[in-house]
Image (spheres, grey):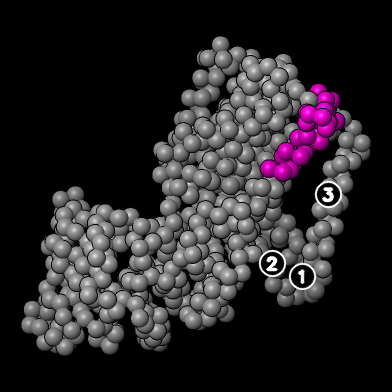
Amino acid sequence: MKKRVKGIVWGVILVVLLLYPWLFGIYFTNVFVTFAIFALFAVSYNLLLGYTGLFSFGHAMFFGAGGYATALALTHIKGCPLLVALLFGFLGAVALALLLSPIVARLAHSAFAMLHLAFSMLLYTLALKLRGITGGEDGIGGFPIPPFHIPGVVSVDMTDPLNFYYFAMAVLGGSLWIAWFLTKTPFGQIIVSVRDNAKRVDYLGFKVPHTKAIIYALSCGFAGIAGSIYAMFQDLISASALGIAQSFAPIVMTMVGGVIAFSGPIWGAGIFALIEELTTRYTERVQLVEGLILIIVILFFPGGFVHLLAVVKGKWLEFMRGKGSGLITGTWFGKKSRKKTTEGNA
Amino acid sequence: MNILETKGLYHDFNKLEVLFDINLEVKQGERHAIIGPNGAGKTTLFNVITGTYAPSRGTILFKGEEVTGCKPHQMVRRGMGRSFQITSTFNRLTTFQNIRMGVLSNRGIRFNLFCKVDKMHDVTRETDEFLKRVNLHNERHLPASALSYGKHRCLEISMALATDPDVVMLDEPTAGMSKDETRYAIELIRQLTEGKTAVIIEHDMDVVFSLADRITVLHLGSILASGPPDEIRKNKAVRDAYLGEMEG
């Protein structure tokens, strides 16, 4: 029964996604693509933060690496196919991660966070200074977006926003599914154990630095895919995609959405997309509103939006059943709350 | 046959010597207790043997092979388990998931990214059987942090044994337990280490003399005496250094 309900929900979501451009028009379709890009970016970040307990201040460098790799491939390789450009984005970010992992996989806590800040600043500066390759402040833009082409079968023009929407949804949705699946595997179990107690993981026969290096590379690869789609979507990638603001985007999205669940960062990205969309109608000071929301969340719902949802669900069940519901997992307004801990992050 | 042996083992922390010339011999299948006053170097000896630190001098032999300088995960893969004096579990995971980590390790399932862990029915079955053996199956779904102290300690000990080691090193397994909990834990250890070799650091002399086949006394970083319980009880040096104050 539960499985059937789940199936229906996913079916409805799929249909809505398919019909979305017709329901809301091309403007909101583009807003949605941006949201989906940041949702994947934030989820990739949460694989490190929420699942492995690694806090990074420089995740944007992998987003940027993916974007630059794709942009460079499309600029310099003549007739580079769409999926190859995407692969370049993924591999670019993974290569950067593998380069850094011998150092960072042995670190944790503030050393991990600060070293990422340093590396991302370094890359940001490089992107600005190496004009010949990166185009400096202007970035790389106006590269050709190739069609989605399978010889003899199909060729779809990707400069059409509608087509690009479906392509982006397939890639981003697929990546999100893979990331989710990853958390359910034995490896996913090992990373949450590393988060809880790395020493004990070692004493159970697992190699902690290797485990961290693998999840790190995968997380960065997903960020690279998000960056790659971003570059193709904008037909532009510039140094700001590597900057501090870009690194903090997934952090605040994850915080606002909630680190305790896989869906948390997706909610967070959605909330921020909505805020931005609604705020820009009245003022340009979007960050002011976003900052306020962040403060409210940290003060009153440290577990984020998913925690709030759980509380509301608990209250609702209590209301429906009368007293004695066992499902309450928190309280309103930051009173001492018992967080949902049973399934780790699940 | 000695399953675990150290030869002339030394260890220092920044030139502060804490272990001197330790020649420990643990025979296959015995329960070997390590006793000694606080600061004698018992936990450091455990840390050196299990790979937390490499010794500054000397060799460690495990199953006849030299393992000096091996890392903890290498020792575990060679068949050593260890529990900690300060409870060290995965607190946000359930009891079941805590034990399952040991089962996964024992089966060599480490970097499997292609199937769901919940769908590995063999692993689930083995984990559940183990939980029944250690009487934690009623707490299966509770996060480790929500367990009572006694149960949490039991989980700590059980995790050391979940990888099905040949030698298990238990660092003060009954630390902080009430009398009843201690009795229960000792029974559990007796049961679980049947047919295995166990090295146990323990302060409770009743436990030591009832459980151990042989005892090694550590004092100020070196071995004062080593032998069967009766011999240790009669040993004058041991009485003076350690036992005397408790029995006199």
Specify the quadrant that holds the N terminus of chain B. Answer: bottom left
Q: Which mark, residue A318? A: 1
Q: Label 2 neighbourhood size at 10 Å, few (<14), some (14-19), many (20+)?
A: many
Q: Residue furthest front?
A: A152
B163 horizontally vs A63: left or right: left
Marking on residue B233 = none
**Which residue is painted at 48% across and 47% down in the image?**
A212
Q: Which marked residue is nearer to the observer: mark 2 or mark 3?
A: 3
Residue B177 in percent (x, y) is at 38, 79
Q: Where is residue B2 in the image (x, y as percent from the top left)?
A: 22, 72
Q: How crowded is mark 3: few (under 14 residues within 10 Å), some or many (20 or more)?
A: few
Q: How far, Cα to Cα, is label 1 from label 3?
A: 28 Å
Looking at the picture, which amino acid does disc 1 mark?
Answer: Glu
The magenta segment: A149-175
Q: Name the residue under label 2.
A: A328
- Element assignment for label 3: helix
Provide the secondary structure element on which disc 2 rests.
loop
Q: Quick check: is A169 in the magenta stretch?
A: yes
Which mark, by number, is residue A13? 3
